[in-house]
């Protein structure tokens, strides 16, 4: 009995020792990660001048001041008076016709860019999906190209395109269309790869060409996904198009940067309200269309 | 080859059977003229609308060709890429942009944590309130960081501070929505177990909810960091400094060899960050 007891005690001792070491190593690891993470955050806060930069000594005061100059002096008595009256709604939104036409231009940029993006993304996705691509080399090349385009923010592309195409909506359309193509190309190719390959094989078995295989084998399966991704992208693109004007690529952004240049902060606030309204509108329309598409896909 | 095959195989439906079918349900065999007309009008209308939209945004072949010739000039100017002795400055700017992205994401996470909890159906059960909170996330999510940055940089002065706040403001609704969904999708049984053994609501959150949702939330925050690195780069255009500022300066003086150098360095950095972040994310989610 005694040697057995001793062995048991020995095993328990060894286990305890190993447990202590493991725990210690784990704690050490956690401490190291924590220290490293805190150091990274601290360094980043320091580099971005978060504490004591040019923002002055009284950040809360400055925020309050900013909100104060952004909110217009509306007077209850004259709120529905015309533009000339100070304190009326019309004098706050004093350039409404221009803004509405610029908002419409923003929507146009978003729609045209999304359509071109869907078209380009569709063709890119055919080349980029493993099951449909004509050759592995093309598959690899298309994927990498789409990746590189996706890393470039659309505003930087727009900046270069504005230098080439001049100030106006066209560079904005191309920039957004490129970004849309790259991201939809990826999403669409994932949808293609998830598609059931049996219809494709059936079309191939009766002698269908590559295009017939895509058209009758793949498209009926993936079209609802395509449409829903495209509509989601349209919502994103309306927001992106609203910002593009800041670099001269058309849309309401031009007025945003003009309001800042002339320090009309209440106008900026008015434009922000209009942009938010536009986004809500596009959101509702796109949601209705998407629900309809889902309804068409599976009739109740 | 297919044609030969179809000659040897007898047709599935004989001609007179086809004729009989046409008698019974003509609209299934031949497309009625009204439907054809409607389709035609629809296509013409949609095409006309599309062309009108294209003209509305100056998307005309002439404007396109003019811009493309200029763009080709720029492209030729990009080779060979050349930093013109500004390597250190550019790398420093990249580091500053990264720092801006990390700081903005960190503040965004701090702001989104309570909002995500409020946006989860399991915490705010009132359907009207829930709808309003989630809808406001959706609306603010669509406002680009640049629109926030434009006014914040005027308010706080040139420099990264306004940019950081702009990034945080962009992140809060996006992360808030993701966090809320993560919390809603969590398994309620561990929390119920803790409540059943007499644990407080706080204990239920700490030991029932957090172990399940924290990895998901951390992964989503990392994803937001990737997106912020791209956003931070554009904020330089409106005065937040960093790589966007360097880039805009060189585009303005048409120094496209330097633009190409910066873009390549930037793309490599983004890819490196995406790679590291994806490794960490897959480790977080799959253990």
Image (cartoon, grey):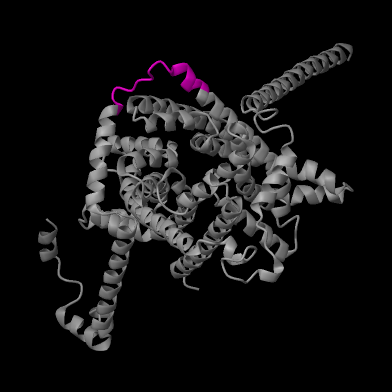
Q: Which residues are magenta?
A: B78-92
Looking at the image, is A60 positioned above or below residue A26? below
- Confirm whether the magenta stretch covers residue B91: yes
Residue at x-position 87% and y-position 15%: A5
In the image, residue B189 lies at what x, y percent? 75, 51
- Confirm whether the magenta stretch covers residue B46: no
Query: Is B11 left or right of A213, judged from the image as shown?
Result: left
Looking at the image, is B95 positioned above or below residue B101? above
In the image, residue A193 lies at what x, y percent? 39, 47
* Residue A25 visible somewhere in the drawing: yes
In the image, residue B241 lies at what x, y percent? 53, 30
* Residue B285 visible somewhere in the drawing: no
In the image, residue A98 lies at what x, y percent? 45, 61
Q: State the quadrant of the N terminus of chain B.
A: bottom left
Residue at x-position 25% and y-position 36%: B72
Residue in front for this viewpoint, B139 or A107: A107
- Quarter of the image where one finds residue B69: top left
Quick one: which residue is furthest to the front in this view? A84
Looking at the image, is B201 positioned above or below residue A46? below
Residue at x-position 26% and y-position 88%: B24
How many callouts does the rendering have?
0
Residue in front for this viewpoint, B21 or B59: B59
Q: State the quadrant of the C terminus of chain B.
A: top right
């Amino acid at each position: 009995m005694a040697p057995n007891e001793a062995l048991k005690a020995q095993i328990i001792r060894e286990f305890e020792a190993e447990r202590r070491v493991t725990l210690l190593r784990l704690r050490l690891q956690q401490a190291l990660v924590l220290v490293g993470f805190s150091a990274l955050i601290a360094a980043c806060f320091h580099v971005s001048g978060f504490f004591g930069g040019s923002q002055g000594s009284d950040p809360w005061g400055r925020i309050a001041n900013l909100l104060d100059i952004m909110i217009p002096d509306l007077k209850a008595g004259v709120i529905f008076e015309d533009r000339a009256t100070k304190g009326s709604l019309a004098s706050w939104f004093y350039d409404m016709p221009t803004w509405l036409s610029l908002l419409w231009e923003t929507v146009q940029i978003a729609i045209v860019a999304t359509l071109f993006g869907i078209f380009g993304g569709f063709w890119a996705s055919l080349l980029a999906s493993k099951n449909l691509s004509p050759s592995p080399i093309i598959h690899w090349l298309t994927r990498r190209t789409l990746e590189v385009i996706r890393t470039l923010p659309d505003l930087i592309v727009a900046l270069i395109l504005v230098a080439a195409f001049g100030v106006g909506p066209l560079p904005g359309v191309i920039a957004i269309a490129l970004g849309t193509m790259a991201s939809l190309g990826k999403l669409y190719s994932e949808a293609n790869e998830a598609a059931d390959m049996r219809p494709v094989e059936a079309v191939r078995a009766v002698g269908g060409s590559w295009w017939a295989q895509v058209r009758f084998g793949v498209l009926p399966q993936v079209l609802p996904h395509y449409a829903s991704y495209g509509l989601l992208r349209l919502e994103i693109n309306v927001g992106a198009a609203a910002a593009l004007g800041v670099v001269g690529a058309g849309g309401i952004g031009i007025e945003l940067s003009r309001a800042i240049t002339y320090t009309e902060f209440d106008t900026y606030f008015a434009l922000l309200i209009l942009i938010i309204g536009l986004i809500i509108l596009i959101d509702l329309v796109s949601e209705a269309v998407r629900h309809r598409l889902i309804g068409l896909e599976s009739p109740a | 080859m297919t044609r030969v095959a179809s000659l040897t195989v007898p047709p599935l439906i004989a001609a007179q059977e086809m004729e009989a079918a046409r008698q019974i349900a003509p609209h299934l065999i031949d497309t009625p003229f009204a439907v054809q007309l409607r389709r035609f009008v629809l296509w013409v209308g949609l095409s006309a609308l599309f062309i009108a939209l294209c003209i509305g945004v100056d998307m005309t072949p002439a404007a396109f060709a003019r811009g493309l010739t200029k763009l080709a000039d720029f492209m030729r100017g990009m080779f060979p890429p050349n930093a013109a002795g500004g390597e250190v400055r550019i790398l420093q700017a990249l580091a500053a942009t990264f720092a801006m992205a990390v700081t903005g994401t960190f503040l965004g996470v701090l702001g989104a944590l309570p909002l995500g909890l409020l946006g989860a159906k399991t915490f705010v059960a009132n359907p009207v309130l829930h709808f309003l909170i989630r809808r406001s996330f959706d609306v603010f999510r669509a406002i680009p960081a640049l629109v926030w940055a434009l006014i914040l940089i005027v308010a706080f002065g040139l420099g990264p501070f306004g940019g950081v706040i702009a990034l945080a403001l962009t992140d809060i609704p996006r992360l808030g929505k993701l966090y809320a969904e993560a919390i809603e999708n969590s398994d309620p049984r561990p929390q119920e177990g803790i409540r059943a053994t007499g644990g407080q609501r706080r204990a239920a959150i700490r030991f029932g909810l957090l172990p399940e949702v924290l990895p998901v939330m951390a992964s989503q925050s990392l994803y937001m960091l990737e997106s912020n690195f791209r956003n931070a780069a554009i904020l330089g255009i409106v005065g937040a400094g960093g790589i966007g500022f360097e880039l805009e300066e060189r585009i303005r003086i048409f120094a496209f060899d330097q633009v190409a150098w910066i873009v390549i360095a930037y793309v490599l950095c983004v890819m490196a960050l995406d790679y590291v972040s994806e490794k960490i994310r897959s480790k977080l989610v799959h253990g």
